[in-house]
Image (cartoon, rainbow, N blue to C red):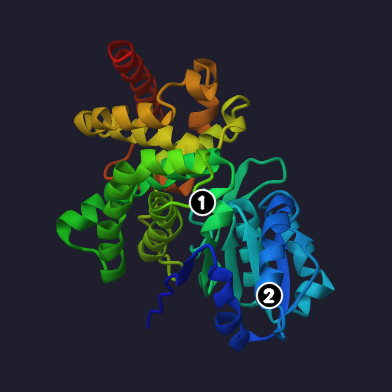
Amino acid sequence: MSTLYLPAWSIGPDCYKEVYEIVRPYGKKVAVIGGHTALSVAMPKLKAALEGTDLELTDPIWFGGEASYENAAMLEAMDEVKNADVIFGVGGGRAMDTAKCAAGHLNKPIFAFPTLASNCASCTTLCVMYYPDGAMRDLYYPKRCAIHTFMDSEIIANSPAEYVWAGIGDSLAKEFESEFAARNDLAAFKIQHAPLMGTAIAKCCTSAFLHYGEKAMEQIRNHVDGYELQQVTLGIVITAGMVSNLTVETVKNEYFYNDSIAHGFYYGCTVCPGAHKHLHGELVSMGILVLLTLDKQFETRDRLFPFYKALGLPMTMEAIELPESDLPTLVDKAATMDNWHYVPTPITKEQFTQAILDTDKAAKAWLAANK
């Protein structure tokens, strides 16, 4: 037997009006967990939408600042969390993954309220967990994804533009990484139905971002809740999350096609002092170019260059403060991650290092020719 949970969602400036009807069948005591800023913008709208109902919200609970097992354990020990019927996760990816981890350990249903369109954590059946110092640790798999994700598009339109920018960079990886990781099984058609769907849906991320990305960035910089921004938000939060849930078997570990070495590049960057200061999706976007270089998909890589330049996504090592002297540290960390092996043919540290250097060289040449 296999069971698969997929995201359900609401989007729009008044989507919190749907919360009571959707949440109430699961109970009435709600532990509200998130980041400080996220809670400050979401709680007033949540309270207004739930006024006059019998849903009981706790006072805002800070998630601890890092997606770590230590912070999840802190939340699990709180009486207001232990006694809650349901959990609301509010904010960005690290807050969401911490709340999901705590909910998973306590076997409580969770509902997601992203206040940023920066990643797909609000919809995924996995949590990216870190050590308290911010270095990548591992992945934790709760039983299921959030029951429902509520995307208040007005809140997202007023969030910092760099998070949507990084979200595009992160989610753009879905098509390239899932195809790369699943290539051999796709070619032999030794692939189950769910990941077969996931690799097909992943292409929707690329087309949406290339078509709507520039306009969406213009809208969020001007705090406009526009159609293009909503479409990009759906691509980052829902489509990417759908791909993740379809391409990862979390119970029997039968398959994992969700990511590959573009995210491996990011994980490597988490232990490099300069690169560590940059956003997750920003680093993943550079990792996409490295993957395409390693895979000798030079035409595809070069076709992305104009889009990267238009959005200001990083194309060179300098753009992410990554000196060549840090490459051994980066590659050593990347090679310890599981996704180092989600490749069509085994790769060596030397090949990965060379792909990073070759990407940097090709991007510099293209930028010089397209000033």
Please indicate, yes or no, whether residue 210 appears anywhere in the rendered image.
Answer: yes
Indicate the position of residue 227 as horizontal and vertical percent values. Answer: 39, 54
Callout 1 secondary element = loop
Q: Are marks 2 and 1 in contact (CB under 8 Å)?
A: no
Q: On screen, 136 above or below 306?
A: below
Query: Could you tell me the amino acid type at mark 1?
Result: Ala
195 versus 370 height, above or below: below
Question: Which residue is depicted at the point 64% across and 64% down?
Answer: 89
Name the mark on residue 106.
2
Q: Amino acid at mark 2?
A: Leu
Going by the picture, which residue comes out furthest to the bottom?
A: 25
Q: How many marks?
A: 2
**Quarter-wise, where is residue 241 in the image?**
bottom left
Q: CA distance from mark 2 to mark 1?
A: 27 Å
The dot on residue 117 is 1
Camera-side residue of 42 and 326:
42
The answer to whether residue 263 of the structure is visible from this angle is no
**What's the mark number on residue 49?**
none
Measuring from the top left, give residue 301's x and y in whole percent.
Answer: 27, 31
Q: Nearer the viewer, mark 2 or mark 1?
A: 1
Q: Residue at x 59, y 76 (%)?
A: 19
Residue ID at (50%, 65%): 125
Q: Residue 4: x and y, percent?
A: 40, 75
Horizontal side, residue 67 vs residue 261: left or right: right
Q: If you read the primary sequence from the N terminus, does the residue marked by circle 2 or circle 1 appear first?
A: 2
Q: Nearer the viewer, residue 122 or 151?
A: 151
Label 1 neighbour load within 10 Å: few <14, some 14-19, many 20+: many
- The C terminus, quarter of image: top left
Residue at the limit of the structure toward the left, as seen here: 188
Element marked by disc 2: helix
- Left or right position of 228 against 84: left
